[in-house]
């Protein structure tokens, strides 16, 4: 969603017509579901329907996205609204990554500790075995 909104915002802000902007956004989204959805949206917009309506009909797009696009269309600030959508989803991704990182860090520490322990045991086990052989002889 962030990439979709950011690309569409940039293209509309640069003066690219909305049909061409939707085509470029779909092909650069990196997601086949979004690419297919933008084809449908582009066809509906080409028929004269506002962008928000086909977005609302496609379940892939969250209600917040469709409502903000609708507001952007009505106020003539579509570029700004798409930018805000992109900012929101980028912040959400950053938050998710931070949470995932905070979960993975302790697991990595435990894994490193186990590996160090195995290496230490592997180094000292032959010495203990040698000491028992020497002491027993």
Image: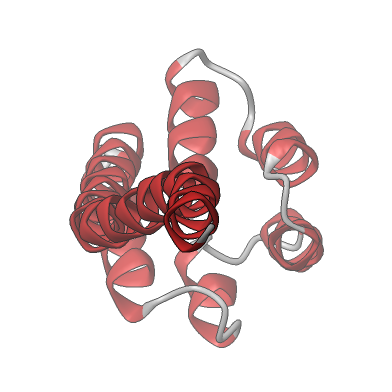
Which residue sits at x=52%, y=50%? 122
**x and y percent of residue 115 in the render?**
44, 51
Q: Nearer the viewer, residue 116 or 120?
A: 120
Q: Nearer the viewer, residue 86 or 52?
A: 86
> Residue 52, relative to residue 134: is it above or below?
below
Q: Is residue 78 left or right of residue 10?
A: left
> Residue 70, relative to residue 23: is it above or below?
below
Q: Quadrant of residue 70?
A: bottom left
Which residue sits at x=49%, y=42%? 123
Image mark count = 0
**x and y percent of residue 84 in the render?**
22, 43
**x and y percent of residue 34 in the render?**
69, 61
> Residue 36, relative to residue 72: is it above or below?
below
Which quarter of the rendering shows the C terminus? Answer: bottom right
Q: Nearer the viewer, residue 18 or 47?
A: 18
Which residue sits at x=21%, y=49%? 98
Specify how the rendered protein is coloured: secondary structure
């Amino acid at each position: 969603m962030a990439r979709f909104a950011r690309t569409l915002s940039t293209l509309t802000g640069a003066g690219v017509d909305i049909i061409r902007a939707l085509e470029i956004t779909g092909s650069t989204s990196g997601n086949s579901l979004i690419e297919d959805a933008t084809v449908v949206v582009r066809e509906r917009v080409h028929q004269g329907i506002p962008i928000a309506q086909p977005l609302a009909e496609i379940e892939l797009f969250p209600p917040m996205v469709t409502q903000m696009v609708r507001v952007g269309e009505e106020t003539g600030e579509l570029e700004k609204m798409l930018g805000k959508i992109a900012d929101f989803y980028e912040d959400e991704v950053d938050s998710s990554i931070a949470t995932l990182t905070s979960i993975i860090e302790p697991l990595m520490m435990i894994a490193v500790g186990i590996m160090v322990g195995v290496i230490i045991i592997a180094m000292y086990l032959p010495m203990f075995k040698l000491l028992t052989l020497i002491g027993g002889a």
